[in-house]
Amino acid sequence: MPTRRIKMSAWDCAITFVVDTDVLKQEELLEMHTFWMNHEERLEKFDGDLLYAVLSMVAHTALYGQFVNDYNLRGVIEQFNWDDGEGIEGFCKMDGSHGVKIVSYEELSIGDFTAVESEGSKNLEVI
């Protein structure tokens, strides 16, 4: 079983996949890829590597879901599960059953906010 471990990262977050290339078929990758707009540009960005182009979309979707919904790893994986009718359109399951498994993530954190008040704002009238 040829497997690849691939980490996709951006900003200060990342997600790691294990991909079984015997299970994940090129046709399924192509279907996921072309389902979404801008697929040509995305493929070009990854120098024609279809797997990287698809995983970049999965990473974006998974980490956005994690950030907005505060998912743990199980929640990140389950958001792609169509068995309960709630999967994300355009993607296969990410539990390994289709050859791609999300195995870990480093969550996006926006950190602490700082406050800066504009000069003269203390005398503003609130309406």
Image: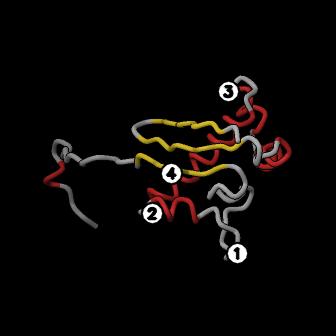
Residue drawn at the location 47% of the way across and 49% of the way down = 104
Which amino acid lies under the numbered mark 1 shown in the image of this protein? Gly
Image disc number at residue 45? 3
Residue topped by disc 4: 63
Indicate which disc, 3 or 1, sits on the residue closer to the N terminus: 3
SS for dot 3: helix
SS for dot 2: loop
Which amino acid lies under the numbered mark 2 shown in the image of this protein? Tyr
Residue drawn at the location 70% of the way across and 73% of the way down = 83
- Judging from the image, the colouring scheme is secondary structure
Quick check: marks 4 and 3 in contact, CB under 8 Å? no
Q: Residues within 10 Å of mark 1 (few under 14, many from 20)?
A: few
How much space separates mark 2 and mark 3, taking CA atoms?
29 Å
Which amino acid lies under the numbered mark 3 shown in the image of this protein? Lys
SS for dot 4: helix
Please identify the quarter of the rendering in which residue 45 is found. Answer: top right
- Residue 70 location, x and y as percent? 41, 63
Please identify the quarter of the rendering in which residue 1 is found. Answer: top right
**Numbered disc in front, either 2 or 3:** 2
Q: Taking 34 as reference, is 57 left or right? A: left
Image disc number at residue 71? 2
- Residue 39 location, x and y as percent? 76, 38
How much space separates mark 4 and mark 3, taking CA atoms?
20 Å
- Residue 93 location, x and y as percent? 68, 59
Residue drawn at the location 59% of the way across and 44% of the way down = 18
**Numbered disc in front, either 3 or 1:** 1
Quick check: marks 2 and 3 in contact, CB under 8 Å? no
